[in-house]
Amino acid sequence: MRWKRLLRWFRRRSDDDFADEIESHLSMEEERLRRSGMSADEARFAARRAFGNATARREEFHERQPGARFESFAQDVRYGLRSMRHTPVFTAIAVASFAIGIGANTTMFGAVDALLVRTPDHVRDADRIYRAYFQMPDRDGKPAPAWPQQGYKTYVALRDSVKGLESVAAFWTQKVSSGRGADARSIDAVAVTPSWFSMLGVQPALGRFFLPTEERDETEHVAVLGYDAWRGWFNGDSAVLGRTIDVAGAPYTIVGVAPARFTGINVNRVDLWLPLGVSTRLLSPGAMDPRMGSYWLEIVAKGRAGVPVGQLASDATRVYRNVWRDSPRYETTFGKSTVLLGSVIAARGPAPNADATVSRWVAAVSLLVLLIASANVANLLLLRGLTRSREVALRLSLGATRWRVARQWLVEGALLAAGGAVAAIALARWTSSAMLTFLLPQAQHEGILSVRLLLFTATVALGTGILASVIPAFVAARRNFAPLLGTGRATSGPARLALQRVLLGAQVALAMLLMVGAGLFVISLRNVQAIDLGINVDRVLYVQPDFGSARKLSRDRNAAAAVNASYRAMLEQVRRVPGVADASFSAGSAFGGGSAISLQRRGGPPLAPGSRVPFLRAVGPDYFETIGTSLVRGRFFTAADHQPNARVAIVDEGTAKQYQLAGGGLDPCVYLGSRSDCTEVVGIVKNSVLWDIIGDKGSIVYLPFESWDDMPIGTLEIRTAGDPTRLIPAIRRAALSVSPDLPWLDIFPLSERVAPQLKPWRLGASMFTAFGVLALCLAAVGLYGLLSYMVTQRTYEIGIRKALGAPSGGVVRMVLRSALGMAVIGVAIGVVAALGAGRLIASQLYGVSPRDPLVILLCAAVLVAVAIVASLAPAVRATRVDPLVALRSE
Amino acid sequence: MPTRETRERAALLQGTLDLLILRTLALGAHHGHGITLAIQHSSQGALLIDHGSLYPALQRLEAAGWVRAEWGVSDNNRRARFYELTAAGRKQLAREASEWRRLAGAVALVLGPELSGG
């Protein structure tokens, strides 16, 4: 039917043709009447009377023509553009407001889209695919946070026993080494069950995926390359099939290439897909033993079409509990556990990571900024509506309908928003990609300016354009303008501007909310950064060579001794690198935890069950000097202590306090682990970080490495004189000179362990601050605009006051009073909102109450100060009103 | 107080104008003025047509494809736009006419014979 409409468009009659027809009708009727005996004048008159309102008919004809609607719309757009051009300052401010509001949202869109909205590429029937989470009761019997990792036997049980599931797959994400010596690299691998690919509905770009027989990886080692790895490492050569790639020291035959942008159901890049059986080499020989109960796999399940998720979850729960039927913890723990089936999009599930949580917060904040921007433009449009009231009155009296007038406002709002959207998209090229890189450094980002982003921006622009102009449109069309036509001035005194004050108060309140958020996050970030980690993060490098699985080595004393010899040789080479100030080694490390060891004071009470057990850290000479942990009491280890028969230990303050060690901590006799003889505590050091910076500290027992069993070393610590990152290449060369065919050698500054942990606070602080400042600017501009208008409108009144001898101070006070009135009410509402919203972000804060009075006071003070600054220019303008000019203009 | 004229000349029911135009054109092509007179004539002056309202109706019928129009010369040598029925228009006329008759018959049944003093 579309072409018919088009045809009508081409064949439509002109308005003149219709007018001709009417003319013809009138003359025929006129002639008929004249023939029946009327005079010429009478006949003409009667003909016209019989016809009725010919002009109205002509207009009706025009309106009904195909395309008439578009024509009047185009007229609105033309008119809108013209009036925008005539008021460049207004246009610039409105477009800039929209650009800020829309820009904030386009910036967040990429990250929110990738984390929360978009189903992963190549995944089909995503609504039937679920991630499995497991929730056990904690000690008090309340449900603990849900957790996705499970053992292989849970996967097998769910796969075989839940009827409503079409298929079940499992995956394990792991960095693995590939290649040897200087060519070695660390690659992002994901080990999966063969059902993985068929369940997600993905097709290989080349070759094939895994066969069901290859799940356990026993007969032949096979691998599937990620698309980018194929392009990067093999130049996209299709002859790659059948070639091998080294995975942690063993050759794997490449049997296929995954399609571009396929990352499974997570967003991070994947270099290599491996069969799940690789875990028996990389993790533990018993990883896929159905009797083992370790937690390392993530399980994904696809329901049959039409089976409700609730039923699947309860079936899965029943099966899961049954798996643990014989466990001694069945009654207390497993029998009360539940299986949750969450969205395939992890951030929507019951256990989102911190990045997803903070991203969601920042996205919500960017929506607030958009609201503020809309309120700002609405206010500007309202004010402009007042100055344009004569024009509206004229249009209404010339026969325009009120809807037509309202539509004009809506079109202008949409036009302004479109301008803002264009600016926002131009900005998004930088802001959006910077945000993505910050939030999802592991994900692949291509094409920031995607169709989705453009569609999103267009929708947001249209929505906010209409949102901002709907009230002004309503007001403009509703007002009775008849009195205005005469004088061009509202003679009944200045408009009360109630609506404008409300909008401005709302803007101030929202700005207050964002600024309080910014303050709280900045303080949290500062608090977190100020945490004493007990070590020198800035100048220390870790060297962690891959000598094979630590678990395997710990079982084989001879292998461990050989590896430790390599570590010591490596240490000697690294010490010689210029710029290295100190170097040591340890088993167990800061940010790496360690193994637990029991500690018993001689004559001390037995430990209460469930109390914290210290971690063992066996350290080489100069460990404390290298890592930067300072001594509180006693002494460090001496050369004489680094002997197999030495029975000395150093504990941190937390341990000394927890175990109430004698001698002010320097206890002459504690029993450690399985040792039956006394160990003397010779020194007490400051508490230092275990894994995460905000976690508990103060439970480490240090022993001279040589005095403990032969366990593999694990980490070389290196303190540098200058910037540690600059020494990495030299240290890598020195270390590799000892073991040229080492599979992988990880060298990184400790600050790299800290930065990711700071990310949620850094993101919160920077985004809340940026958006808070933008909101503040918008509120200031809005206030300025409103006050300027008020001063202009009250020129006459001010003129009279001045003519009657009122001092300038009174006028300034009048303007300031209006400004402060709005600011204070807005701030008050903002404070209430901030107190209410505080509970929501309390869990994201650190070391500061969400109701911190100092932050709230400071933000209130800043807002009031900004309100005063924004009102200065209008106030000064008010003092410059010349009474003569003002009165004459009336 | 209604005048005698308006009481005896029934105002057109909504939508019946289209039917009347189609019926008039079934007898042959006509211009707008002619259609007006023809309807008034054949209803023996009982139907009142607002001349102006005829043209939007004609525009509607033309858009629907039931009539087509062409400029021509009238009997008394005037330029006029002549309308004629299309094949689709003929079908539409048949449909609307039978519907109208059914409706009129149904109303007549309900009303029954004229009551005395009614």
Image (cartoon, helix red, strand yellow):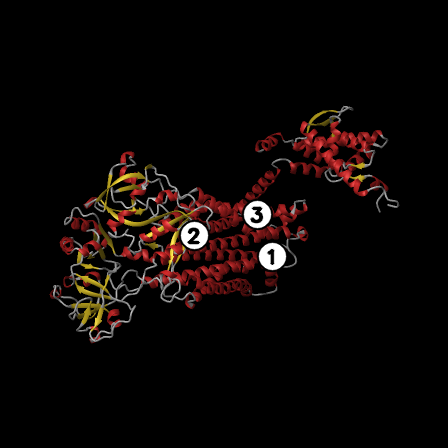
Q: Is residue B51 left or right of residue A740?
A: right
The Cα atoms of the two marked residues, 3 and 1, are separated by 34 Å
Determine the image quadrant of residue B109: top right
Kindly identify which chain the residue marked by label 1 belongs to: A
- Which residue is at the front of the view, A17 or A532? A532
Residue placed most toward the observer, A653 or A159: A159
N-terminal of the pair, mark 2 or mark 1, is: 2
Whether residue A759 is visible = no
CB under 8 Å between discs 3 and 2: no
Horizontal side of B52 relative to A417 (left or right) equals: right
Choose mark 3 or mark 2, whichever is in front. Answer: 2
Q: Do callouts 3 and 1 point to residues on the same chain?
A: yes
Q: Are marks 2 and 1 in contact (CB under 8 Å)?
A: no
Residue A410: numbered disc: 3
Looking at the picture, how far across and down is residue A440, in whole percent?
36, 50
The residue at the far front in this view is A326
Question: Which amino acid does the dot numbered 2 rest on?
Answer: Leu
Mark 2 highlights which residue?
A312
Quarter containing the C terminus of chain A: bottom right
Q: Quadrant of the N terminus of chain A?
A: top right
Mark 1 surroundings: few (<14), some (14-19) or many (≥20) residues within 10 A: some
How many residues crowd around disc 3 within 10 Å: few (fewer than 14), some, or many (20 or more)? many
Label placed on residue A886: 1
Whichever of labels 3 and 2 marks the residue nearer the N terminus, that label is 2
In this rendering, does residue A208 appear at all? Answer: yes
Query: Which secondary structure lies at badge 1?
Result: helix
Question: Up-down: is B117 above or below A49?
Answer: below
The image position of residue A596, as x and y in percent, is: 24, 63
Element type where label 3 sits in the image = helix
For the residues bearing labels 3 and 1, Cβ distance under 8 angstroms: no
In the image, what residue occupies the spot 61% across and 51% down?
Answer: A476
Alpha carbons under labels 3 and 2: distance apart = 49 Å
